[in-house]
Amino acid sequence: KPGPLIRMEPGQKYKLTLRNTASDPSLKTNIHTHGLHIPGDGDADDITRSVEGGSCLDYTYDIPADHPGGTNWYHPHKHE
């Protein structure tokens, strides 16, 4: 099932919480974005971060004021 549509505005900061609803803690995942000009580390778009099944993980996206408009996308990454 696709995730929800998220509309973001340049110059704004957004906090998203990923809830991994898998019942098995070994089923780890995260969120990865394409097209957003945000850091690839910390609590933004670091693909090495993961959340175990049954847990949550917060992301903070600080969208630069000069960020170009466009259609960007996000998806999960499975971790083992």
Image (spheres, grey):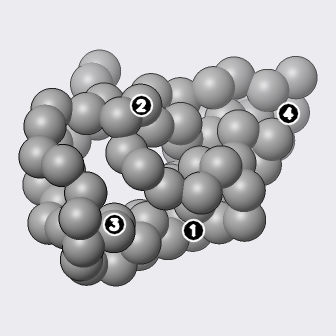
Which is more toward the observer, 65 or 32? Answer: 65
- Marks 1/4: CA–CA distance: 19 Å
Disc number lying in front (1 or 4):
1
Disc number lying in front (1 or 2):
2
Mark 3 or mark 1: which comes first in sequence? 1
Look at the picture and state if 10 lies above or below 3: below
The local crowd at label 4, few if under 14, some if 14 to 19, many if 20 or more residues have their Cα within 10 Å, is few
Mark 4 or mark 2: which comes first in sequence? 4
Q: Amino acid at mark 2?
A: His
Secondary element type, mark 1: strand
Residue 46: x percent and y percent?
Answer: 69, 48
Q: Amino acid at mark 1?
A: Asp
- Left or right, 55 with reference to 48: left
The local crowd at label 2, few if under 14, some if 14 to 19, many if 20 or more residues have their Cα within 10 Å, is few
Q: Which residue is mark 3?
A: 63
Residue in view at x 33 percent, y 68 percent: 64
Look at the picture and state if 78 lies above or below 25: above
Mark 1 or mark 4: which comes first in sequence? 4
Q: Which residue is mark 1?
A: 58
Mark 3 or mark 2: which comes first in sequence? 2
Residue 34's tag is: 2
* Mark 3 and mark 2 residues within 8 Å of each other at the beta carbon: no
The picture quadrant where one finds residue 41 is bottom right
The picture quadrant where one finds residue 50 is top right
**Hey, which residue is sitting farthest front in the picture?**
66
